[in-house]
C-alpha cells in the first residue's frame, strides 16, 4: 500500500500522538509499504528518512490564510504521492484530508488519541476511526460517531524504532525512595494532586523524594506552589527529558494522577522499567493497567486517597516489590509491532472483502508475530 500520515509535527518533545505516528510510519515502511509523512517537521525527520519514509513540510496552524495555503499544498502532495490510505492523527489534518478524499480517490483513516477534546468529533470525517482504547471508542459512540466506523487498536510503543531497548539505558542516581511522574505540566495531568499527596506523606517518610519530569504551560504555577511548602528541597522539577526511561529505572513508585487520559502510554514504559504504579481510575487507564492487575487505581482529583496509597507502598516493602513485579507482566501486547499489524489490518479491511479477524491473521504473519 501507499500510506500517507498527516500530523502537526514530528518533534521529539514527548508528545504521545507524534510518537505513535512516527512508530507506525517507520514500521509500515519496514514491512514493505511505501510510506510518507506530512507535517511541520522536527527531529524525527532523520529517523523517518533512515526507514525510507519520505517527509513533506506542511504547516497546519489554524489561521484562515494558512489553512487555505495548507489545503492547496496538501493537494499538490497527494497528487504527487498518490496514496491509497491517508491516516490523520490530529483534527486539522483530518479536516484537510477529508476535503480531498473523494476527488483524489484515497481512503481516509483517523486515530482518536484525545477524545476529551471537543474537536475530536471531527475525526469522524474519516472512513474508519481508530480508538486507542475501548473507553475512547465508547465515548466516541456517545458523541455520535457510528459504531460501525470504529475500530479499537490499543496503544503501544514498546520496542519502538525511536529508542533503545530498556536494558540499554543507564539509570539515574535518584534519591530513594523515589516517586516519579512523567507528564506534561498541565493541570489536567493531576500535578497539583500529586504534589498535595506528596506533602501529606513527606513528613512520615523523611527520605522520600518526588521527581516531576516534563514541561508545559502550568509549570511556573506548580513551582510557585512548591516554593510555599516545607518540602521544596525534596520536590524536583526536571523539565522535558528525551530519555525518561533513565528516571523510571531508578523509580520506586510511578504516579499518573491525570483527570482524563485516553490511554496513558507512559504507563506502559513505567511498567517495562519495573516501577510500582499508582494511577487515576479514569478513561483508558484501567485498560493500560490490566484492570487493576498491574497497578493501583485511585479516584482522580483525590489527593488524600493518593497519599494513602503512597503511604501503604512506602511502608510495606513486600507490597512494593509485589507491585513492581506485577507491572512487568503481560507487556507483549504493548509492542509497537502489534499496533502496526492491527492498524494495517484496518487499512486492509477497507480495501478487501476480508473480515477483520482474517485480515489480522494475515498481518500477524507479515510482522512475524
Image (tube, helix red, strand yellow):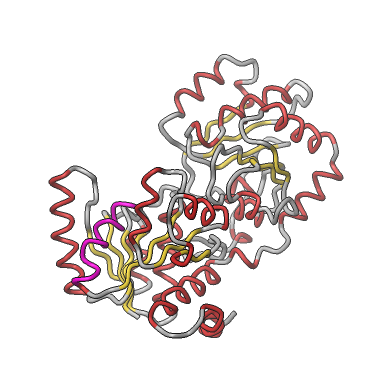
User: In this figure, what is the number of numbered marks?
Assistant: 0
Q: Is the C terminus in the top left, top right, bottom left or bottom right quadrant?
A: bottom right
Of helix, strand and loop, which mostly describes the magenta segment?
A: helix
Report the side of 46 relative to 148 (left or right). Answer: left
Q: Residue at left 59%, top 49%?
A: 246
Q: Decide which of 160, 196 is in the foreground and name it.
A: 196
**Depth check, front residue: 107 or 184:** 107
Residue 272: % across, % down: 65, 57
- Asked whether residue 54 is drawn in magenta, I would say no
Residue 96 position by quadrant: bottom left
With 234 as the anchor, is 107 left or right in this view? left
For image coordinates 73% across by 50% down, the residue present is 292
Residue 329 horizontal/vertical position (percent): 73, 61
Which quarter of the figure is the N terminus placed in?
bottom left
Looking at the picture, does residue 316 appear above or below residue 349? above
Give the magenta-colored segment's residue range.
91-103
The structure residue drawn at horizontal position 17% and vertical position 58%, both measured from the top left corner, is: 71
Q: Is residue 324 above or below residue 198?
A: below
Q: Is residue 95 magenta?
A: yes
Residue 338 at x, y percent in the picture: 55, 71
Is 280 on the left-hand or right-hand side of 45? right
Query: Residue 277, relative to residue 344: is it above or below?
Result: above
Quadrant of the image occupied by residue 54: bottom left
Estimate the x, y position of residue 282 in percent, counting from the top left. 61, 43
Amino acid at each position: 500500500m501507499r500510506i500517507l500520515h498527516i500530523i502537526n509535527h514530528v518533534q521529539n518533545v514527548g508528545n504521545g500522538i507524534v510518537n505513535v505516528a512516527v512508530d507506525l510510519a517507520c514500521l509500515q515502511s519496514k514491512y514493505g509499504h511505501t510510506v510518507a509523512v506530512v507535517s511541520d517537521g522536527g527531529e524525527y525527520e532523520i529517523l523517518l528518512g533512515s526507514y525510507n519514509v519520505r517527509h513533506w513540510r506542511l504547516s497546519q496552524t489554524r489561521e484562515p490564510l494558512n489553512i487555505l495555503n495548507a489545503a492547496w499544498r496538501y493537494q499538490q502532495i497527494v497528487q504527487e504521492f498518490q496514496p491509497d490510505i491517508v491516516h490523520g492523527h490530529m483534527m486539522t489534518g483530518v479536516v484537510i484530508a477529508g476535503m480531498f478524499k473523494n476527488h483524489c480517490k484515497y481512503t481516509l483513516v483517523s486515530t482518536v488519541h484525545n477524545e476529551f477534546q471537543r474537536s475530536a468529533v471531527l475525526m469522524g470525517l474519516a472512513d474508519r476511526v481508530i480508538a486507542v482504547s475501548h473507553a475512547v471508542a465508547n465515548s466516541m459512540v456517545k458523541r455520535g460517531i457510528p459504531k460501525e466506523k470504529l475500530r479499537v487498536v490499543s496503544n503501544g510503543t514498546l520496542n519502538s524504532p525511536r529508542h533503545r531497548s530498556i536494558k540499554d539505558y543507564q539509570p539515574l542516581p535518584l534519591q530513594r525512595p523515589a516517586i516519579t511522574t512523567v507528564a506534561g505540566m498541565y493541570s489536567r495531568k493531576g500535578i497539583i494532586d500529586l504534589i498535595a499527596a506528596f506533602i501529606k506523606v513527606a513528613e512520615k517518610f523523611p527520605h522520600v523524594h518526588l521527581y516531576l519530569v516534563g514541561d508545559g504551560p502550568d509549570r511556573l504555577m506548580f513551582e510557585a506552589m512548591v516554593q510555599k511548602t516545607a518540602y521544596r528541597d525534596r520536590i524536583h522539577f526536571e523539565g522535558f527529558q528525551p530519555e525518561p526511561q533513565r528516571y523510571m529505572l531508578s523509580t520506586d513508585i510511578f504516579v499518573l494522577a491525570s483527570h482524563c487520559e485516553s490511554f496513558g502510554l507512559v504507563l506502559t514504559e513505567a511498567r517495562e522499567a519495573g516501577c510500582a504504579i499508582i494511577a487515576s481510575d479514569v478513561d483508558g487507564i484501567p485498560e493500560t493497567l490490566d484492570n487493576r492487575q498491574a497497578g493501583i487505581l485511585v479516584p482522580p482529583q483525590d489527593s488524600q486517597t493518593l497519599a494513602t496509597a503512597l503511604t501503604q507502598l512506602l511502608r510495606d516493602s513486600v507490597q512494593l516489590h509485589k507491585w513492581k513485579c506485577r507491572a512487568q507482566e503481560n507487556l507483549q501486547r504493548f509492542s509497537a509491532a502489534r499496533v502496526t499489524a492491527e492498524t494495517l489490518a484496518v487499512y486492509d479491511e477497507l480495501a478487501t472483502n476480508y473480515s477483520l479477524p482474517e485480515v489480522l491473521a494475515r498481518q500477524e504473519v507479515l510482522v512475524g508475530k
